[in-house]
Image: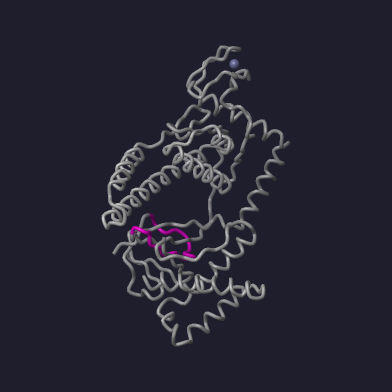
Amino acid sequence: MSKHFGHCRFVFNRFLHERKEAYEADKTSLNYYANAKSLTGLKKETEFSWLKEVNSQSLQASLKHLDTAYKNFFKQQNRFPRFKSKHERQSFKVPQNVFVVDEKLIIPKFSEGIQLKQHRPLEGKILFATVSKTTTDKYYVSITCEQAYIPYPKTGKAVGIDTGIKELVILSDGSRHENIKSLKTSLKKLKYEQRQLSKKQKGSHSRLQQKRKLVSVHEKITHIRKDYLHKVSTEIIKNHDILVVEDLAVKNMLKNHRLAQAMSDVSLGTFYTMLEYKAKWNEKDYVKIDRFFPSSKTCSNCGWINQELKLSDRKWMCSDCGEIHDRDLNASKNILNQGLKILSGYGTQSDIKQKREEALSLDKSANPEALPISFAVGG
Ligand SMILES: [Zn+2]
């Protein structure tokens, strides 16, 4: 496996270098086919015959990966490709001939199989696999399968969604999803391990070990959080046809930036992304409301605006109609109302349907049916 990681990294770096040189020399740009041809030549040289030790398709996949990185750079979607380092996360792709038999992963050059701990059953047709190793020496394989997607049935319900720190989401129907406790425990552990790190001598072996421990805690936190965000976003999508959210950029402007805050900002971004793509998969409307709409200050009952509302006010009474508001619930009700106004502004129902179809067809290129599934490889 080390050979696969190493050889694929070598191919990526070597051809990145070659492409850079060709461009600097006479502005020629080498494409994937030029690179693939050179790679075949390279393998015939005695000096580089060791490249034959690994699955040749994985090496070609490295070249494709490089090519995509280049294309994304020129589309201005990404920064210029960087050389891969052996100190970062390692990976190689297996584009074909991936099988899972009796809890074993079978890929070219590993005909005896690699024991794995499967997290969920495989569904659909296997397309390809990516084997990776974290900096903490954990091995994973992500297997991408293709299957027909069956959207959740329609419910006829619309919902406004507000997000916060203590509670992850507050829905306009009054239901709430708290930020999970297990995360709090892990965050405490994180703080503890960070303190331990500061006590270790710089450059010492025990400091290095402590650093690895810290990365492990970070990994665990990421996994717990992601799993929870998936559960909550799926539940919301299942139960509603129209989802109205606030632009996250505004929320960030209003906040200060302590550690817990910054971490919650990251998960909020992920949460909105999940909601958005799951809405597309399930043919539901996802509406983002205007960034300067005062969702907290407006009375959801009569529309009066409370200019005096402070960030610390959790409850307030409307001076106009006398309604008593829970700050977050009121905000999510306003978000819903505003979203429905925007939707009705589109015109007839068929216009909305058309807009949705446009959005869906745009997304087809991203192949929403291909869902990556991750497994941990044991051994
Ligand atoms: Zn009012």
Residue 96: x and y in percent read: 47, 71
x and y, in percent, of residue 134 in the image: 38, 59
Between residues 158 and 294, which one lies in front from this camera angle?
Answer: 294
At 32% from the left and 65% from the top, the residue drawn is: 102
Rendered residue at 64%/72% (across/down): 29
In the image, is 200 to the left or to the right of 164? Answer: left
Q: Is residue 360 magenta?
A: no
Left or right: where 225 falls relative to 347:
left
* Quadrant location of the N terminus in the rendered image: bottom left
Q: Residue furthest front?
A: 202
Asked if 278 appears above or below 170 in the picture, the reply is below
Instruction: Identify the residue at horizontal 50%, vertical 26% (top origin).
Output: 328
Q: Is residue 41 above or below residue 322?
A: below
Confirm whether residue 1 shows in the render.
Answer: no
- Bounds of the magenta segment: 120-136
Return the x and y of residue 228 as percentages of the image width and height: 41, 42
Task: Using the image, determine if residue 99 lies above or below residue 257.
Answer: below
Residue 126 magenta: yes
Q: Is residue 84 left or right of residue 190?
A: right
- Quadrant location of residue 374? bottom left
> Quadrant holding ligand 1?
top right
Residue most extreme to the left? 206
